[in-house]
Image (cartoon, rainbow, N blue to C red):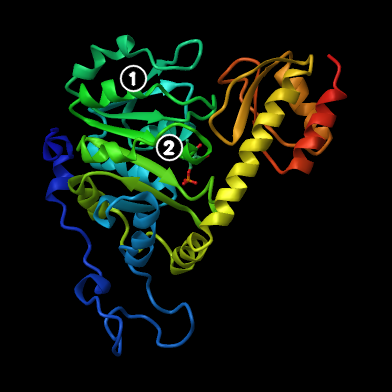
Amino acid sequence: MADIDKIVRESVKKLVPYSCARDEFQGRKGIFLDANENPYGELNRYPDPYQKELKIAVSKIKGISEENIFLGNGSDEIIDLCFRTFCNPGSDCALTFYPSYGMFEVSAAINTVRLIKVPLTDDFSIDPGSIKELLMAPDLRLILICSPNNPTGNSMKRSDVEYIISNFSGIVLVDEAYIDFSEQESFRLLTAKYNNLIVMQTFSKAFGLAAARIGMAIADRAIINYLNKMKPPYNISSLNQKAVLKSLGRINLFKKRIHKIKTERERLIIDLKKLNIIEKVFPSDANFILVKTRNADEIYARLINSKIVVRNRSRIVPGCLRITVGKKSENNRLLKALSRINL
Ligand SMILES: Cc1ncc(COP(=O)(O)O)c(C=O)c1O
Protein backbone atom coordinates (compact mmCIF):
# COMPACT_ATOMS: atom_id res chain seq x y z
CA MET A 1 0.00 0.00 0.00
CA ALA A 2 1.38 3.41 -0.97
CA ASP A 3 1.06 6.24 1.56
CA ILE A 4 -0.95 8.70 -0.57
CA ASP A 5 -0.71 11.54 1.97
CA LYS A 6 3.07 11.34 1.70
CA ILE A 7 2.99 11.72 -2.08
CA VAL A 8 0.64 14.72 -2.10
CA ARG A 9 2.13 18.23 -2.12
CA GLU A 10 2.24 19.80 1.33
CA SER A 11 0.32 22.87 0.12
CA VAL A 12 -2.43 20.62 -1.27
CA LYS A 13 -2.75 18.77 2.02
CA LYS A 14 -3.23 22.09 3.80
CA LEU A 15 -5.56 23.49 1.16
CA VAL A 16 -9.04 24.46 2.30
CA PRO A 17 -11.07 23.94 -0.89
CA TYR A 18 -13.55 26.51 -2.12
CA SER A 19 -16.93 25.78 -0.61
CA CYS A 20 -19.65 26.56 -3.12
CA ALA A 21 -23.34 27.11 -2.42
CA ARG A 22 -24.16 23.66 -3.83
CA ASP A 23 -21.75 22.09 -1.30
CA GLU A 24 -23.68 23.60 1.60
CA PHE A 25 -27.18 22.74 0.43
CA GLN A 26 -27.71 19.75 -1.81
CA GLY A 27 -31.51 19.49 -2.04
CA ARG A 28 -33.16 20.02 -5.41
CA LYS A 29 -36.36 21.71 -4.37
CA GLY A 30 -36.81 25.16 -2.90
CA ILE A 31 -36.32 28.82 -3.66
CA PHE A 32 -32.64 29.17 -4.40
CA LEU A 33 -31.30 32.49 -3.20
CA ASP A 34 -27.89 31.19 -2.18
CA ALA A 35 -25.56 31.24 -5.20
CA ASN A 36 -26.13 34.70 -6.66
CA GLU A 37 -27.68 33.09 -9.72
CA ASN A 38 -30.07 34.95 -11.98
CA PRO A 39 -33.67 33.77 -11.36
CA TYR A 40 -34.49 34.00 -15.10
CA GLY A 41 -33.48 31.77 -18.00
CA GLU A 42 -32.81 28.12 -18.78
CA LEU A 43 -29.11 27.90 -18.08
CA ASN A 44 -29.22 30.17 -15.02
CA ARG A 45 -28.29 27.56 -12.40
CA TYR A 46 -24.80 26.25 -11.62
CA PRO A 47 -24.23 22.58 -12.44
CA ASP A 48 -23.85 19.81 -9.88
CA PRO A 49 -20.18 20.22 -8.85
CA TYR A 50 -19.73 16.48 -8.29
CA GLN A 51 -21.83 15.31 -11.28
CA LYS A 52 -23.62 12.69 -9.16
CA GLU A 53 -26.21 11.59 -11.72
CA LEU A 54 -23.60 11.19 -14.41
CA LYS A 55 -21.27 9.31 -12.08
CA ILE A 56 -24.04 6.83 -11.22
CA ALA A 57 -24.49 6.13 -14.95
CA VAL A 58 -20.72 5.87 -15.52
CA SER A 59 -20.38 3.62 -12.49
CA LYS A 60 -22.86 1.12 -13.99
CA ILE A 61 -21.08 1.01 -17.33
CA LYS A 62 -17.59 0.72 -15.88
CA GLY A 63 -18.43 -1.57 -12.93
CA ILE A 64 -16.72 0.88 -10.54
CA SER A 65 -18.26 2.53 -7.47
CA GLU A 66 -19.16 6.25 -7.93
CA GLU A 67 -16.85 7.05 -5.02
CA ASN A 68 -13.90 5.86 -7.06
CA ILE A 69 -14.70 8.04 -10.08
CA PHE A 70 -13.58 11.60 -10.76
CA LEU A 71 -14.81 13.46 -13.84
CA GLY A 72 -12.62 16.08 -15.46
CA ASN A 73 -13.09 18.70 -18.15
CA GLY A 74 -11.49 16.25 -20.58
CA SER A 75 -8.67 13.89 -19.61
CA ASP A 76 -6.36 16.84 -20.12
CA GLU A 77 -7.72 18.49 -16.96
CA ILE A 78 -7.03 15.28 -15.03
CA ILE A 79 -3.42 15.12 -16.27
CA ASP A 80 -2.89 18.71 -15.15
CA LEU A 81 -4.55 18.07 -11.78
CA CYS A 82 -2.23 15.10 -11.20
CA PHE A 83 0.86 17.26 -11.73
CA ARG A 84 -0.56 19.95 -9.43
CA THR A 85 -1.61 17.50 -6.72
CA PHE A 86 1.44 15.25 -6.58
CA CYS A 87 4.49 17.15 -7.90
CA ASN A 88 6.21 20.10 -6.25
CA PRO A 89 7.15 22.57 -9.00
CA GLY A 90 10.86 23.03 -9.49
CA SER A 91 11.94 20.11 -7.33
CA ASP A 92 9.96 16.93 -8.07
CA CYS A 93 10.03 15.05 -11.36
CA ALA A 94 7.71 12.82 -13.35
CA LEU A 95 8.46 10.05 -15.83
CA THR A 96 6.90 8.93 -19.06
CA PHE A 97 7.87 6.92 -22.10
CA TYR A 98 8.72 8.19 -25.54
CA PRO A 99 7.03 8.56 -27.99
CA SER A 100 3.74 9.08 -26.17
CA TYR A 101 0.88 11.51 -25.68
CA GLY A 102 2.12 15.09 -26.06
CA MET A 103 0.07 16.58 -23.23
CA PHE A 104 2.18 14.76 -20.62
CA GLU A 105 5.12 16.93 -21.62
CA VAL A 106 3.07 20.12 -21.93
CA SER A 107 1.43 19.64 -18.53
CA ALA A 108 4.80 18.91 -16.92
CA ALA A 109 6.25 22.10 -18.43
CA ILE A 110 3.28 24.24 -17.38
CA ASN A 111 3.72 22.99 -13.83
CA THR A 112 7.53 23.39 -13.84
CA VAL A 113 8.03 19.68 -13.29
CA ARG A 114 10.99 17.96 -14.94
CA LEU A 115 9.78 15.10 -17.14
CA ILE A 116 12.08 12.13 -17.64
CA LYS A 117 11.35 10.61 -21.05
CA VAL A 118 12.40 6.97 -21.27
CA PRO A 119 12.52 5.65 -24.86
CA LEU A 120 10.24 2.75 -25.74
CA THR A 121 11.89 -0.24 -27.39
CA ASP A 122 11.94 -0.71 -31.19
CA ASP A 123 8.50 -2.33 -31.07
CA PHE A 124 7.26 0.53 -28.83
CA SER A 125 7.07 -1.50 -25.64
CA ILE A 126 8.37 -0.70 -22.16
CA ASP A 127 11.72 -2.13 -21.07
CA PRO A 128 11.19 -2.41 -17.30
CA GLY A 129 14.95 -2.91 -16.83
CA SER A 130 15.58 0.61 -18.16
CA ILE A 131 13.68 2.22 -15.26
CA LYS A 132 14.43 -0.19 -12.42
CA GLU A 133 16.71 2.28 -10.63
CA LEU A 134 14.68 5.37 -11.52
CA LEU A 135 11.70 3.87 -9.66
CA MET A 136 13.64 4.36 -6.43
CA ALA A 137 14.40 8.09 -7.01
CA PRO A 138 12.98 10.03 -4.03
CA ASP A 139 11.94 13.05 -6.13
CA LEU A 140 10.02 10.96 -8.69
CA ARG A 141 6.33 11.38 -7.84
CA LEU A 142 4.37 10.53 -10.96
CA ILE A 143 4.68 8.03 -13.82
CA LEU A 144 2.48 8.43 -16.90
CA ILE A 145 1.83 5.44 -19.14
CA CYS A 146 -0.38 5.55 -22.21
CA SER A 147 -1.91 2.21 -23.25
CA PRO A 148 -2.94 1.82 -26.03
CA ASN A 149 -0.26 4.36 -26.76
CA ASN A 150 -0.65 7.51 -28.83
CA PRO A 151 0.88 7.87 -31.46
CA THR A 152 2.14 4.27 -31.82
CA GLY A 153 -1.20 2.45 -31.37
CA ASN A 154 0.11 -0.56 -29.42
CA SER A 155 -0.87 -1.64 -25.91
CA MET A 156 1.78 -1.99 -23.24
CA LYS A 157 2.41 -5.47 -21.83
CA ARG A 158 0.23 -5.97 -18.75
CA SER A 159 3.07 -7.51 -16.73
CA ASP A 160 5.37 -4.52 -17.49
CA VAL A 161 2.77 -2.01 -16.33
CA GLU A 162 1.97 -4.03 -13.22
CA TYR A 163 5.70 -4.31 -12.46
CA ILE A 164 5.91 -0.51 -12.44
CA ILE A 165 2.78 -0.01 -10.31
CA SER A 166 3.88 -2.55 -7.72
CA ASN A 167 7.50 -1.38 -7.53
CA PHE A 168 6.86 2.35 -7.31
CA SER A 169 5.77 4.21 -4.21
CA GLY A 170 4.49 7.26 -6.15
CA ILE A 171 1.45 7.63 -8.41
CA VAL A 172 1.06 5.73 -11.70
CA LEU A 173 -1.38 7.24 -14.18
CA VAL A 174 -2.42 4.81 -16.93
CA ASP A 175 -4.07 6.72 -19.78
CA GLU A 176 -6.56 4.38 -21.46
CA ALA A 177 -8.14 6.90 -23.84
CA TYR A 178 -8.27 4.23 -26.59
CA ILE A 179 -9.05 1.13 -24.50
CA ASP A 180 -12.50 0.53 -26.04
CA PHE A 181 -10.88 -0.10 -29.43
CA SER A 182 -8.60 -2.73 -27.93
CA GLU A 183 -9.02 -6.42 -27.11
CA GLN A 184 -6.79 -5.91 -24.07
CA GLU A 185 -8.27 -5.87 -20.60
CA SER A 186 -8.49 -2.46 -18.93
CA PHE A 187 -6.38 -1.76 -15.85
CA ARG A 188 -9.32 -0.08 -14.11
CA LEU A 189 -10.21 -3.01 -11.83
CA LEU A 190 -6.61 -3.05 -10.57
CA THR A 191 -7.32 0.27 -8.81
CA ALA A 192 -8.92 -1.85 -6.06
CA LYS A 193 -5.61 -3.68 -5.61
CA TYR A 194 -3.17 -0.76 -6.00
CA ASN A 195 -4.02 2.49 -4.20
CA ASN A 196 -1.31 4.38 -6.16
CA LEU A 197 -2.93 3.62 -9.54
CA ILE A 198 -5.08 6.10 -11.49
CA VAL A 199 -6.72 4.77 -14.65
CA MET A 200 -7.89 7.49 -16.98
CA GLN A 201 -10.49 7.03 -19.70
CA THR A 202 -12.45 9.48 -21.82
CA PHE A 203 -15.76 9.98 -23.60
CA SER A 204 -13.92 11.71 -26.44
CA LYS A 205 -12.93 8.64 -28.46
CA ALA A 206 -15.09 5.47 -28.42
CA PHE A 207 -18.20 7.42 -27.34
CA GLY A 208 -17.65 10.10 -29.99
CA LEU A 209 -18.21 12.94 -27.50
CA ALA A 210 -14.99 14.93 -27.88
CA ALA A 211 -16.95 18.20 -27.91
CA ALA A 212 -18.42 17.49 -24.47
CA ARG A 213 -14.93 17.42 -22.88
CA ILE A 214 -15.42 14.73 -20.27
CA GLY A 215 -12.63 12.48 -19.07
CA MET A 216 -12.68 10.16 -16.08
CA ALA A 217 -10.18 9.07 -13.48
CA ILE A 218 -10.74 5.80 -11.63
CA ALA A 219 -8.75 5.45 -8.41
CA ASP A 220 -8.69 4.86 -4.68
CA ARG A 221 -10.94 7.22 -2.68
CA ALA A 222 -7.98 9.02 -1.11
CA ILE A 223 -6.82 10.11 -4.58
CA ILE A 224 -10.36 10.99 -5.73
CA ASN A 225 -10.79 13.18 -2.62
CA TYR A 226 -7.61 15.11 -3.44
CA LEU A 227 -8.65 15.61 -7.08
CA ASN A 228 -12.05 16.91 -5.90
CA LYS A 229 -10.30 19.30 -3.55
CA MET A 230 -8.13 20.67 -6.38
CA LYS A 231 -10.64 21.02 -9.21
CA PRO A 232 -12.48 24.25 -10.02
CA PRO A 233 -15.91 23.97 -8.31
CA TYR A 234 -18.02 23.66 -11.46
CA ASN A 235 -15.55 22.00 -13.80
CA ILE A 236 -18.15 20.34 -16.05
CA SER A 237 -21.04 22.31 -17.53
CA SER A 238 -24.67 21.19 -17.17
CA LEU A 239 -24.93 21.00 -20.97
CA ASN A 240 -22.02 18.60 -21.19
CA GLN A 241 -23.18 16.48 -18.26
CA LYS A 242 -26.60 16.15 -19.89
CA ALA A 243 -25.16 15.37 -23.31
CA VAL A 244 -23.09 12.49 -21.95
CA LEU A 245 -25.97 11.18 -19.78
CA LYS A 246 -28.22 11.12 -22.83
CA SER A 247 -25.61 9.29 -24.86
CA LEU A 248 -25.05 6.67 -22.19
CA GLY A 249 -28.65 5.59 -22.73
CA ARG A 250 -27.66 4.53 -26.26
CA ILE A 251 -24.79 2.27 -25.35
CA ASN A 252 -25.63 -0.32 -28.04
CA LEU A 253 -25.28 2.31 -30.73
CA PHE A 254 -21.76 3.08 -29.49
CA LYS A 255 -20.87 -0.60 -29.39
CA LYS A 256 -21.96 -0.92 -33.03
CA ARG A 257 -19.91 2.11 -34.04
CA ILE A 258 -16.83 0.81 -32.19
CA HIS A 259 -17.24 -2.48 -34.06
CA LYS A 260 -17.48 -0.61 -37.38
CA ILE A 261 -14.33 1.41 -36.61
CA LYS A 262 -12.42 -1.73 -35.64
CA THR A 263 -13.52 -3.52 -38.82
CA GLU A 264 -12.45 -0.52 -40.92
CA ARG A 265 -9.13 -0.40 -39.05
CA GLU A 266 -8.36 -3.99 -40.02
CA ARG A 267 -9.35 -3.34 -43.64
CA LEU A 268 -7.20 -0.20 -43.75
CA ILE A 269 -4.23 -2.08 -42.32
CA ILE A 270 -4.50 -4.71 -45.08
CA ASP A 271 -4.90 -2.13 -47.86
CA LEU A 272 -2.20 0.24 -46.57
CA LYS A 273 0.28 -2.66 -46.56
CA LYS A 274 -0.28 -3.06 -50.33
CA LEU A 275 0.98 0.47 -51.10
CA ASN A 276 4.64 0.77 -52.05
CA ILE A 277 5.02 4.29 -50.59
CA ILE A 278 4.33 2.71 -47.19
CA GLU A 279 7.22 0.83 -45.66
CA LYS A 280 5.55 -0.40 -42.50
CA VAL A 281 2.10 -0.47 -40.96
CA PHE A 282 2.29 -0.79 -37.20
CA PRO A 283 -0.29 -2.94 -35.38
CA SER A 284 -3.02 -0.91 -33.68
CA ASP A 285 -5.27 -1.33 -30.64
CA ALA A 286 -6.65 2.18 -31.15
CA ASN A 287 -8.79 4.11 -33.66
CA PHE A 288 -5.72 5.21 -35.60
CA ILE A 289 -2.86 3.58 -37.45
CA LEU A 290 0.78 4.62 -37.47
CA VAL A 291 2.50 4.06 -40.81
CA LYS A 292 6.15 4.44 -41.76
CA THR A 293 6.43 5.98 -45.20
CA ARG A 294 9.11 6.70 -47.77
CA ASN A 295 8.70 10.46 -47.33
CA ALA A 296 6.23 11.59 -44.67
CA ASP A 297 6.43 15.35 -45.42
CA GLU A 298 5.80 14.84 -49.14
CA ILE A 299 2.92 12.40 -48.64
CA TYR A 300 1.39 14.66 -46.00
CA ALA A 301 1.52 17.64 -48.37
CA ARG A 302 0.03 15.65 -51.26
CA LEU A 303 -2.82 14.43 -49.06
CA ILE A 304 -3.52 18.01 -47.98
CA ASN A 305 -3.76 18.91 -51.67
CA SER A 306 -6.46 16.25 -51.93
CA LYS A 307 -8.13 17.81 -48.86
CA ILE A 308 -7.31 14.81 -46.68
CA VAL A 309 -5.75 15.66 -43.34
CA VAL A 310 -3.70 13.09 -41.47
CA ARG A 311 -1.19 13.77 -38.69
CA ASN A 312 2.45 14.13 -39.62
CA ARG A 313 4.30 12.55 -36.68
CA SER A 314 7.66 12.33 -38.45
CA ARG A 315 9.30 14.75 -35.99
CA ILE A 316 8.48 12.27 -33.22
CA VAL A 317 8.68 8.93 -35.03
CA PRO A 318 10.89 9.31 -38.14
CA GLY A 319 9.03 8.83 -41.44
CA CYS A 320 5.69 8.27 -39.74
CA LEU A 321 2.16 9.49 -40.36
CA ARG A 322 -0.72 8.81 -37.99
CA ILE A 323 -4.00 8.09 -39.70
CA THR A 324 -7.30 8.17 -37.82
CA VAL A 325 -9.78 5.52 -38.93
CA GLY A 326 -12.70 7.34 -40.54
CA LYS A 327 -15.96 6.23 -42.13
CA LYS A 328 -15.70 3.65 -44.92
CA SER A 329 -16.18 6.30 -47.63
CA GLU A 330 -13.51 8.54 -46.05
CA ASN A 331 -11.05 5.65 -45.80
CA ASN A 332 -11.72 4.78 -49.44
CA ARG A 333 -10.85 8.34 -50.46
CA LEU A 334 -7.67 8.17 -48.43
CA LEU A 335 -6.63 4.86 -50.01
CA LYS A 336 -7.36 6.19 -53.49
CA ALA A 337 -5.34 9.36 -52.88
CA LEU A 338 -2.42 7.37 -51.48
CA SER A 339 -2.46 4.92 -54.40
CA ARG A 340 -1.98 7.87 -56.79
CA ILE A 341 1.20 9.05 -55.08
CA ASN A 342 4.43 7.90 -56.71
CA LEU A 343 7.71 8.75 -55.03
C1 LIG B 1 -3.71 9.32 -25.05
C2 LIG B 1 -4.68 10.43 -24.97
N1 LIG B 1 -5.15 10.79 -23.78
C3 LIG B 1 -6.02 11.79 -23.65
C4 LIG B 1 -6.48 12.48 -24.75
C5 LIG B 1 -7.42 13.64 -24.58
O1 LIG B 1 -8.60 13.21 -24.05
P1 LIG B 1 -9.74 14.27 -23.68
O2 LIG B 1 -10.45 14.61 -24.93
O3 LIG B 1 -10.58 13.50 -22.69
O4 LIG B 1 -9.08 15.46 -23.04
C6 LIG B 1 -6.01 12.15 -26.02
C7 LIG B 1 -6.44 12.92 -27.20
O5 LIG B 1 -6.05 12.77 -28.30
C8 LIG B 1 -5.09 11.10 -26.12
O6 LIG B 1 -4.58 10.74 -27.31
Q: Which x, y percent locates residue 223?
A: 22, 45
| Residue 296 in picture, x, y percent from top left | 71, 20
Q: Residue at x 39, y 17 (%)?
A: 126
301, 128: nearer the viewer: 128
Instruction: Give the alpha-carbon distance from disc 2 to disc 1, as whole Å.
Output: 15 Å
For numbered disc 2, what is the local secondary structure?
Answer: loop
As drawn, the label of residue 211 is none
Residue 302, horizontal then vertical, whole percent: 81, 27
Determine which of the numbered discs, if any, sits on residue 160 in the image.
Answer: 1
Compared with 323, 278 (above or below) is above
161 relative to 249, above or below = above
User: Closest to the observer: 61 or 298?
Assistant: 61
What amino acid type should be assigned to the residue bearing mark 2?
A: Glu
Inspect this view and state whether residue 83 appears.
Answer: no
Left or right position of 223 against 301 = left
Of callouts 2 and 1, the N-terminal one: 1
Mark 1 and ligand 1: say if the CB distance to the nearest ligand atom is below 8 Å. no
The residue that appears at 48% across and 63% down in the rendered structure is 240
Which quarter of the image is occupied by the C terminus?
top right
Count neighbours of disc 2 (C-alpha within 10 A) and say few if under 14, some if 14 to 19, many if 20 or more.
many
Q: Viewed as shown, does residue 294 lie left or right of 258?
A: right
The label on residue 176 is 2
Q: Amino acid at mark 1?
A: Asp
Looking at the image, which is closer to me, 297 or 247? Answer: 247
Q: Quadrant of the N terminus?
A: top left
